[in-house]
Amino acid sequence: MQFNGDDEVEPVLQDLDRLALVAIEFPVFRDGRGFSQARLVRRAGFKGQLRAVGDITRDRFEYLQRCGFDALQVPEDRFKPETLNAFGEVGAYYQGAADDPRPIYRQGR
């Protein structure tokens, strides 16, 4: 199933137990609603593949992962093998996220 920020997330949440893949589209760079939608889908218990599609760029990869995405569909004209170096560039996060809900003051740093 694929949807974007213009679509309601509730119908998707009702069908999660029957879905193996949920794709969330980022129609333009300035539209960040997909981050919130991904967190809602993961918080609802979805264990399948959560894929980001559309206008996604290297500088957002790691945050996409932190929000629960585990697959990216990068437009061919934007992908280079070194783009994958974006993962792991940031070593400390202030906010909790899908990958670790604890804020930095609870992370024992």
Image (spheres, rainbow, N blue to C red):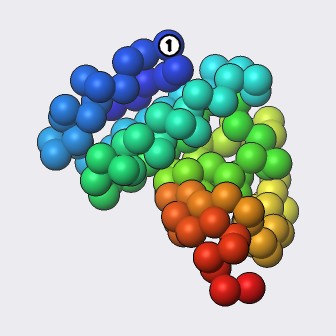
One can see residue 71 in this view: no
Q: Check the image and name the residue furthest to the front.
A: 105
Q: Can you give x and y, in whole percent of width and height, for residue 14 in the image?
A: 19, 32
Q: Quadrant of residue 86?
A: bottom right
Q: Residue at x 76, y 27 (%)?
A: 29
Across and down, in percent, residue 57 comes to 77, 41
Identity of the residue drawn at 62% across and 76% down? 106
Q: Residue at x 82, y 69 (%)?
A: 89
Q: Quadrant of the C terminus?
A: bottom right
- The residue shown at (66%, 30%) is 32
- Which residue is the extreme one toward the top? 6
Say left or right for 16 vs 42: left
Identify which amino acid the numbered label 1 is placed on. Answer: Asp
Which residue is identified by label 1?
A: 6
From this view, report whether residue 14 is shown above or below residue 60: above
Dot 1: within a 10 Å radius of its alpha carbon, few (fewer than 14), some, or many (20 or more) residues?
Answer: few
Residue 43 in picture, x, y percent from top left: 36, 50
Is residue 57 visible in the rendered structure shown here? Answer: yes
